[in-house]
Image (cartoon, coloured by chain):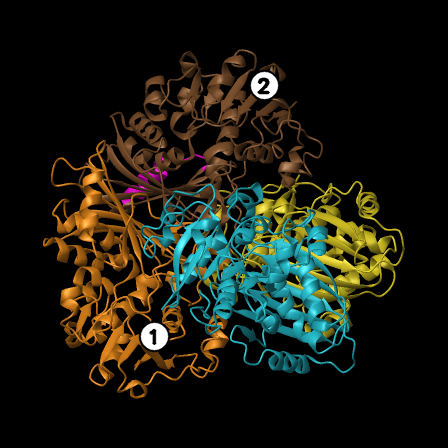
Chain colours: A orange, B cyan, C yellow, D brown
Amino acid sequence: MAYRAAVVGGSGYTGAELLRLLAAHPDLDVVHVTADSNAGARVASLYPSLAAAYPDLVYGPMEPAAVAGLDVVFLAMPHGASQGFAPGIVDTVAHVVDLGADFRLPADRYAQWYGEAHTAPELIDRFGYGMVELYRDQLAQHAHAAVPGCYPTAASLALAPLFAAGLVEPDVIVDAMSGLSGAGRGLKVGSHFSEADENVVAYGLLTHRHTAEIEQALTEVGGAPVTALFTPHLVPMVRGMNATCHARPTVDGLSTAKLLEVYRDFYAGEPFVVVADEPPPTKAATGANTCHVTVRFDDRTGRVLALGVLDNLAKGASGGAVQNANLLLGLPETLGLPTVGMWP
Amino acid sequence: MAYRAAVVGGSGYTGAELLRLLAAHPDLDVVHVTADSNAGARVASLYPSLAAAYPDLVYGPMEPAAVAGLDVVFLAMPHGASQGFAPGIVDTVAHVVDLGADFRLPADRYAQWYGEAHTAPELIDRFGYGMVELYRDQLAQHAHAAVPGCYPTAASLALAPLFAAGLVEPDVIVDAMSGLSGAGRGLKVGSHFSEADENVVAYGLLTHRHTAEIEQALTEVGGAPVTALFTPHLVPMVRGMNATCHARPTVDGLSTAKLLEVYRDFYAGEPFVVVADEPPPTKAATGANTCHVTVRFDDRTGRVLALGVLDNLAKGASGGAVQNANLLLGLPETLGLPTVGMWP
Amino acid sequence: MAYRAAVVGGSGYTGAELLRLLAAHPDLDVVHVTADSNAGARVASLYPSLAAAYPDLVYGPMEPAAVAGLDVVFLAMPHGASQGFAPGIVDTVAHVVDLGADFRLPADRYAQWYGEAHTAPELIDRFGYGMVELYRDQLAQHAHAAVPGCYPTAASLALAPLFAAGLVEPDVIVDAMSGLSGAGRGLKVGSHFSEADENVVAYGLLTHRHTAEIEQALTEVGGAPVTALFTPHLVPMVRGMNATCHARPTVDGLSTAKLLEVYRDFYAGEPFVVVADEPPPTKAATGANTCHVTVRFDDRTGRVLALGVLDNLAKGASGGAVQNANLLLGLPETLGLPTVGMWP
Amino acid sequence: MAYRAAVVGGSGYTGAELLRLLAAHPDLDVVHVTADSNAGARVASLYPSLAAAYPDLVYGPMEPAAVAGLDVVFLAMPHGASQGFAPGIVDTVAHVVDLGADFRLPADRYAQWYGEAHTAPELIDRFGYGMVELYRDQLAQHAHAAVPGCYPTAASLALAPLFAAGLVEPDVIVDAMSGLSGAGRGLKVGSHFSEADENVVAYGLLTHRHTAEIEQALTEVGGAPVTALFTPHLVPMVRGMNATCHARPTVDGLSTAKLLEVYRDFYAGEPFVVVADEPPPTKAATGANTCHVTVRFDDRTGRVLALGVLDNLAKGASGGAVQNANLLLGLPETLGLPTVGMWP
């Protein structure tokens, strides 16, 4: 018997990606999907890609009552919106999986990085931080999950083995590149095809909010406060994300071979992490719930270089969300999730 | 119990796409994959996208003996190669599904359009023409299938309802656009990123070989010889194909509304054809085994305009191949095949 | 001594392209540039590409008085806006070059295709139709010019030699593809990178307004009323346009070789038209004021196929505008205009 | 009177870009162009973009005698080839401008990074290092010039003001992204459209040869040995390059405002460097001979972040080459060089 699911905020890109993934999930049925300004529209009119699988599905309005009693409710809302919506459902549905930033950080860190007070701070502890590979145990103690951001997932999975083994100093540099889908479906000049195509541009210099999550996750793994300088760049593709990460070793005698072994051990048995010898291309993960990582030690400059790639909408958002839902529902973690990227 | 499958020629793009689709197929197991110059290489070294699903799979050499006894063998070889390979396996495996052009046309038409005599003409009749939606009955009488070309699939499905209803003259114009993956993984200047990106160029003027298939399929559907002027264009994307088709009506009183009704009736119950009101975007079908079509009647010029889009590697090749394999094996036609496109 | 020019509506893409081209023009100085909602902003803040050439230029408000007395004023406004602005300047500046659609068609045809009455019909005759290669003589009798649309330029230059020689029936099919820059800088879902990338979609089926211009230009060249069925498609690139055109011959004995000779004769001496043997790639014209054409006769289907490519912002808009300005000012037609495309 | 120029190796991308730029140069005439395997072919057959400007130009063979006596010879050959060709012309032509890597480094550094002994080490000192903005004085003492690599130009111009002012430690991290044209016209799987599109991938980890040039240029500017960890990435666009650079300050009291002032002072009067407040998009420089830079100080992590963008084929290769030729010939440095990027 399939579990009953809803997608709240199904007209944005993470919502559409949830509908794509759930159409292939054997044990999760989408029984309700909502939208804000698009309420009343057919899903297939916004996303012709969904016409065959959801020919008659219509976006309903954003009402908590409409999802009461469901097994899992995915919140795919703009950042800041789920802290207003979640209070109305956390006690009426079995599991909430929030794809926004609202329940990822403690209230004080949230206020510091997002520039506004959290309006439902008492709920934050009821959400586990859904970076499954690093927080699987903690997650098991929660009914609800906050899916991590895409950049934090790529960077943290790329660097985590180094921190777990205590091999690097708690001060990292992350230069990352993302496809445009990460900027969402909202209209802005920078997302216009003629502006973004054949263009690379850094943004959010020094202040990108995902910095807080990267620091939080690596602090958790390494046990000591970590500082990160994070610089994201938009690159002209739809999906895909690469994090190129730098750290200083704390020990002597490192080599690339040893580090790759550390990574293979750390991720042994993880179904969604591939440790690669060669620099991983983002295309390896397109449409899949995987993160590919590799690592190098540079004798010449005495630095460690770690790389992680993923699909920002899949493993970096909606795929990660389904992985979390599987865990919360007691299903096999891999159920319904593709591990093959679309190449070419 | 799963059927046992092989992919012969698994290092090209249709081969990689077969491996992607088969990884999600519940009743087909890939037990063997071969390559020519890449024999001995790990599949994941050519396609990092396949690393998680096929971590240890290695391309074997192209030997007929290696696939003997299997339930289904997919031939994803360069055009012209399968007529050399097929004779060695048609009697030793249950079903051959050929993705090449070798068994789609009668020997004389093959020689005319491909400029060389067919070397295994006696086998051609043992292959059904696998344009399932138009040849489903004929296909049921064959053990083997020849998967149609990508352009013929898009154009024929776009125009078929008109010919089935006898509404247009047997003389059509097809202007089509294809992403670069249709040109294969082989290296040539025209497929170079810096040449193909930000570029549209027509090719194969007057002589593209897929013309023969378009004419054959529409002749079959309409019952009278059809002539087509087919002009393909390369456009800067990886996957996706659009066929914009023109015909003259044979009857009075047409309207767009009537034609859309004809199309909806003709494709009623087809799981992989979507009849759309609006012009279908190629992205609707990316990664999916679907073809989206629409139609217009232009009062002003007295012409019929029909549009069809699909993913040249999915519905236009490897997805169509799996659909054929399902039918040949007696499985549900839709088994394991995605109907949701990747959008964005 | 340089002539003094203004760009009215300089914040859109044709305006920015004018500023790019005029920066390299030896005899035209930009002394004023205006914008609507962006008035007061630095040009370089919208277009960092213009920072080195126009470091301090600021968009002024849209006031006719500000351009009075100038030698040439380019109107790069949204379609429909210049009929409101032009009356205030046609008698106060030497030459107006309008890039919009307002002064390209007679008032009745304008009303028919644009769905609204023209508000300054008495001015239409004061503008020559600036498709220079076909209307050079008529243009010389006007003080002002209406730059043709991008699609009409590509299609008309591709087909004109056939009509001038009376070789084809006055009933054509044009399937065209355009990069996204043709849709302008305005924000809409269809121009969003994540929607438009890796996507081809037809639009404006049966009713695209440029149809009227194509029919008008070919009627002018051929001397008999021409009907066109025009279907444009958006393809994922910024600049570039291809028109694939079909016609029926009126005479026997055609061949591709003869047609190419007709084309070479017709365009002999034209500095901006290249008659090519091979199908011309749009990239040949990127950033240049050129149109590349070729032609074929298909014995098998008895049809003529003509192709034309250009850069929709250059030859198809702002480059054509400068070509017109050169003529109106009595300068060499080629002055300051690039003929080399940016490849790669 | 125009100077007479030749392009040796004119069939590659930097050669084609030289032909594009020289077509607009008032004082340099291309009198000879050579190619290796393409000798005998029309330039316009490889580059239709050059058809209008060079309709009849044919690639000649690579013979030193053919260029003897010319004013300037551009060598646009594969890396490693010009050290074989240059000895035959350095004394027979007035100026050689080499776009390859052969004359950029001392012989020992060349051998170390390029893995082979230099075959004409005695000529290296006769070439000035053509990073004009940083080596203008030294260049004036040489007859010949070695045009710097694209990555070194972007990274060195981004970081130079910091080193000139002694503000940072001599140990930097550079993460850079380049469009595919930097990989040249040669065929390889990684440059295939279907592989490179919708993909980002790091390459040359720890060992990219441009590291040596970055270290050399910053050492020259700062006066103390500099170490760089340089990691390039391919991103799916044709042209454009971004260098994101990290350094540690050596002094207290830095701020972004102060650093921007340092940059503005350092580059005051430079016609081809734009110091921007906002992160510069690569598109700002497309087709232009400009480099756009910005800088930040991050109080939180105590690091300096510097960004530089350019067009790898223009300022990063052929534009830089023309800038060098202008200087060597005593022409105005800016002659014939565009400063406006193509946007959109």
Q: Are marks 2 and 1 in contact (CB under 8 Å)?
A: no
Chain that bears disc 2 = D
Quadrant of residue D161 in the image?
Answer: top left
Q: Are marks 2 and 1 on the same chain?
A: no
Q: Residue D92 placed where, x, y %?
A: 56, 12
Q: Nearer the viewer, mark 2 or mark 1?
A: 1
Q: Which residue is mark 1?
A: A26
Q: Is residue D259 above or below residue A67?
A: above
Quadrant of residue C211 in the image?
Answer: bottom right
Q: Toward the viewer: D216 or B193?
A: B193
Quadrant where the C terminus of chain B sits is: bottom left
> Does C204 lie within the magenta span?
no
Name, please, the residue furthest toward the front.
B91
Q: Is residue D216 visible?
A: yes
**Span highlighted in magenta in the image:** D258-272
Q: Toward the viewer: C252 or D50?
A: C252
Q: Toward the viewer: A237 or D166?
A: A237
Q: What residue appears at the point 63 percent right and 67 percent down from the top-left corner?
A: C81
Element assignment for label 1: loop
> Does D265 lie within the magenta span?
yes
Quadrant where the N terminus of chain B sits is: bottom left
Q: Is residue C277 above or below residue D327?
A: below
Q: Residue C275 placed where, x, y %?
A: 74, 44
Q: Is residue C187 visible?
A: no
Name, please, the residue furthest toward the right.
C252
Name, please, the residue furthest toward the left.
A223
Mark 1 residue crowding within 10 angstroms, few (<14) / some (14–19) / many (20+): few
Q: What residue appears at the point 58 percent right and 69 percent down from the top-left corner?
A: B139
Q: Residue D38 placed where, x, y %?
A: 61, 30
Q: Which residue is mark 2?
A: D71
